[in-house]
Image (cartoon, rainbow, N blue to C red):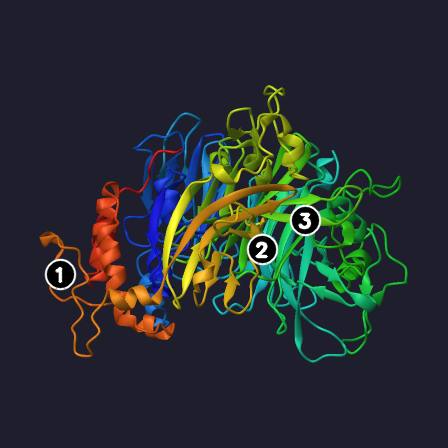
Amino acid sequence: MRVAVSLSLCWLWAAGLSLPRLRLSYRELLASNRSVLFFGHRGSLGLRCLYLDEYRDRLFLGGKDVLYSLLLDGATAGAKEIYWPPRPGQTEECLQKGKDPGTDCANYVRVLHPYNRTHLLACGTGAFHPMCTFVYVGHRGEHTFSLDAASVESGRGRCPHEPSRAFASTVIGGELYAGLTADFLGRDPGVFRSMGTRSALRTEVDQRLLHDPKFVAAHLIPDNDDRDNDKAYFFFTEKVVEADSREHAIVSRVGRVCVNDAGGQRVLVNKWSTFNKARLVCSVPGPDGIDTYFDELEDVFLLRTKDRKNPEIYALFSTVSHVFRGSAVCVYRMADIREVFNGPFAHRESPHHQWAAYEGRVPYPRPGVCPSKTTNQPRRQYGTTKDFPDEVLHFARAHPLMFQPVLPRHRRPLLVKTDLPQRLRQLVVDRVEAEDGQHDILFLGTDAGSVLKVVVTQKTNSAVTEEVILEELQVFKMPVPITQMEISVKRQMLYVGSSLGVAQVRLHQCESYGTACAECCLARDPYCAWDGTACTHYQPSGKRRQRRQDGRHANPAHQCLDQNLTVDDFESVEEKVLYGAEDNSTFLECVPRSPQASVQWFVQRPPDEQRDEVKTDERIVQTEQGLLFRRLHQHDAGTYYCKTLEHGFTQTVAKTALRVIPSQQLAHSSPRGPGDELPALLCPEPRLVPQAPKSWFKDIMHLVSSPNPRRVEEYCARLWCSSRPQHRKSKLAQAKLVLAGVDVAKKGRTGKAHSERNRVPRHAAAT
């Protein structure tokens, strides 16, 4: 049995409130060895790109003036680096332009792509003079890492000038496809192709093609088995002006070009001749056909399937509405995207007219298709886009936009969050095989250094979905935006990057869900299952006899019936004794093990053995963390039970025996004279005597309207010193110093922070 004393609201402040079961802080991640951090020793890493090479078991990082190669096999000396600053003279020229020498005038590595079997392509901002080179990484099993200084060349059209400017790229067949703004002033946006043996291509400088775009992602997605039909898809946002409005609106787009595009012969020379774009819609249907749109595209993740031609596209959106702020995740099928690109083109007579479907004759070959066997005719062979008639190229230039938008699966978002204090920035998805089928686990990175792990389940025979936040992990100590996330299904790890460094987090932490079958089942984590003795990682090929898992319904009464865990036993919970002063405030703490559980309070008052539900009112308030008595009465004494209910499963979480100290007893046990001095609050131990005693909770005692704060203060201090258990001496010693005004915790924190600043480890062993 544990004994505690309630001094008033100040006691709640001193003890702190427990966080939800799987909301782990930065320190808890480190203490539980679930996070491996890497920091550059030249200060802030300034991470701008991250490439996970599972073939070589290495992680490549691009930061500020530096490249890193990390081994992921647990080797302690598994980090190598390459110092890659701007060229001589570039920093001075950057300073002359008035840029910040500490941030802008450096080489931020923005591009890291596999180029061939032994090299990576790396490009950086180069102090506003983009440059590219090749990095030798060797074969599998080697840890070679060297930069080819002789191959450094201009990165214009391949890498942005500024480290913070939006940008997307991919390498296809030894050629770099990039969407970016290619000039210093940010007025030359386009889709570029460079490197390789063919001539470079780009989009025309035309606002009909791209108007102030922000590129988010670029991917190769083949149409069919004919490689001539391969296309590069770009996901971006841009500004548009509608006919009935003078203000710019932001819309999200998906655009594509043919990989074998060679430009035109007389029209669109060295320009894309197959560029098309369509709107990506992510909206919540409302009454009277009014939708709530999420138009700001934040991130895109391709969930690859067995059919490489039909990945599922997960897109993270946010809203820039003045009414509310929120985020949504929509899922798109490639079949729907291709149908839109094969549909009608958009057309309007002038900027003052509304968009309409083009109803005229569309020339052949259809603008946007790739030259291949399907476009050839008996009398006319189209081996390249240079063979396309000028009529086709003129039409493609004038009609880049498709009329129909791309709608998400089920015509609504998979996930909508409007109540989060952070903004969602990054998204990765893992498809997990569970006992009841497949589940897609979403990992969402925020602008506050945390990651949300979410599973979305679909109700039986319905399109209605339910999302459950399984974990909230504070990955970084500082609330910095998460800029990169890569998932390793092979290693079951998530790699999270920010400007400060990189963290490694396990995809599943089944042991954190508790030690009972019901708790493991209620967690609803598809990664985890009850194996008969513990909550462990689910293995589809494992033994099925003792396995318990139900991610869709989480019904422990059904799943754990033979485990005898459905009986709610009040007596099995450890009892805590809490003393409260009459007419003072008191708090009974109770944190449910699951944030989805509802909480009920019951009280048993002696000598009655019946347990009655606690009636709340203005004096007794039920909060998320427990039960608050604003003003304690003598008849409140009794034993209080905190009971949770979730999916039909009930259990007692806390049992507290509340003892109420009458105000008369306080009056008899303390001095009555108006001039009497308060005794010292410290327990009589010489090593704990402070230099300047302070009663830190006296002001709060006045605020809660106690009849005699001085007497309550003295009584609680005496009770504190006389009732402490011997096995908790160390913790009580620190608490007594806090009561006396000596902030030893602050001193400890200061010392620890100083030691953390001076530590050198940049990479620890993987877990």
Residue type of the residue flagged with mark 1: Pro
Examine the rendered structure and indicate whether residue 678 appears above or below residue 227: below
Q: What is the count of numbered marks?
A: 3
Q: Nearer the viewer, residue 258 or 633?
A: 633
Q: Secondary structure at mark 1?
A: loop
- Identify the image quadrant of the N terminus: top left
- Left-right relation of 228 to 218: right
Q: Which residue is mark 3?
A: 466
Single out the mark in the foreground, 2 or 1.
1
Residue reaching furthest left? 686
| Mark pair 1, 3: CA separation | 55 Å
- Left-right relation of 248 to 90: right
- Left-right relation of 99 to 642: left
Residue 176 makes an appearance in the image: no
Q: Are marks 1 and 3 in contact (CB under 8 Å)?
A: no
Residue reaching furthest front? 607
Residue type of the residue flagged with mark 2: Val
* Label drawn at residue 216: 2
- Identify the image quadrant of the C terminus: top left
Q: Are marks 3 and 2 in contact (CB under 8 Å)?
A: no
Q: Specify few, some or many for label 2: CA neighbours under 10 Å numbering under 14, 14-19, or 20 or more.
A: many
Residue type of the residue flagged with mark 3: Glu
Q: Residue 20 in the image: x percent, y percent?
A: 48, 49
* Label drawn at residue 690: 1
The picture quadrant where one finds residue 273 is bottom right
N-term-proximal mark, 3 vs 2: 2
